[in-house]
Amino acid sequence: LRREELAQLAGVSTDYYTRLEQGRHLNVSEAVLDAVARTLQLNDTERAYLFELTRPRPRRTVRRRPPRAQRVRPGVHALLRTLDGVSPAFVLGRRGDVLASNRLARALIIDFEALPYHERNMARFMFLDEAARSLWPEWETVAAEMVASLRLEAGHHPEDPRLTELVGELTIKSPEFRTWWADHNVREKTHGVKLYHHPVVGDMTLAYENVIVPGDPDQALCIYTVEPGSPSEAALRLLASWTATPSADPYAPRSEGAPSDGSRSDGFRSNARPSRGPSSDVSP
């Protein structure tokens, strides 16, 4: 539809709709926003994003404090430990930062614990590591969903400097990210199914659930499961058998204040690119 047609269907003038598109019209009524949402056939997530974008934000005369560091509670670390050997699981924070993970998740995706702290981010891995394209056979779908998730978060946290930095880096380094970011799609993924192609155990179909961690709405516990008796279960069990004997305790709590030089709280240090195979434990 053309802008004039959208304005007519929403019951507003073309000039009004143009100013609304350009962000030059504040204090928009809910009735107008509802009409625009219906005209554009927005889903619940997209509608909430529209309202978020048009909500007046108070002027601040003092410098805004940076977002508080996200910390994974000991109980959540214990849950990751319980799931290890059964289900890959990890905690995603703001910007897609991987705040914690169990061994099976690291064997499946990448050894996040061996990465410098600032690189422990799912979006960075997805767009800047070539291994991601073979790991997810449906990479374009998975990556586009990640962009839509980051776009949604940008609406919730428009003044997050680290999010701005991440988006800037990915925009420069990835033409796909740059294209999809310009589409302004938003999506909230709470569950679904993903296809994986692991270089050692082969193809797997994994269902996932993203569970919001109580006490921090910006943390999600991501848990993968497989259909009992399926080839995917056999492949995941084989992968789990290779992670059963750790070389060090990977569950030391970490936060946004963690070291960024690649050092680990267990005293190990990795300078090599981490692998996803059964030999991914870090050597001292």
Image: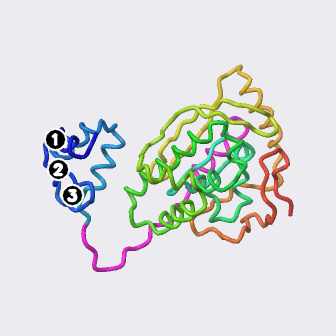
Classify residue 51 as left or right of residue 136: left
- The percent coordinates of residue 44 (x first, y second) are 33, 38
Label 2: how many residues lie within 10 Å, few (<14), some (14-19) or many (20+)? some
- The percent coordinates of residue 25 (x first, y second) are 19, 60
Name the dominant secondary structure of the magenta segment.
loop
Quarter of the picture containing the N terminus is top left
Quarter of the picture containing the C terminus is bottom right
Per the image, the residue denoted by label 1 is: 8
Q: Which mark is residue 14?
A: 2
Callout 2 amino acid = Thr
Q: Nearer the viewer, residue 138 or 222?
A: 138
Real-space CA distance between mark 3 and mark 1, rounded to the nearest whole angstrom: 15 Å
Q: In which quadrant of the rendered view does residue 253 lie?
A: bottom right
- Whether residue 108 is visible: yes
Callout 3 amino acid = Arg
| Local SS, label 3 | helix
Is 72 contained in the magenta span? yes
Label 1: how many residues lie within 10 Å, few (<14), some (14-19) or many (20+)? some
In percent of the image, x 75 and y 38: which residue is there? 198
First in residue order: circle 3 vs circle 1: 1
Callout 1 amino acid = Gln
- CB of mark 3 within 8 Å of CB of mark 2? no
Classify residue 115 as left or right of residue 149: right
Q: Which mark is residue 19?
A: 3
Q: Which residues are magenta?
A: 58-86
| Local SS, label 2 | helix
- CB of mark 2 within 8 Å of CB of mark 1? yes
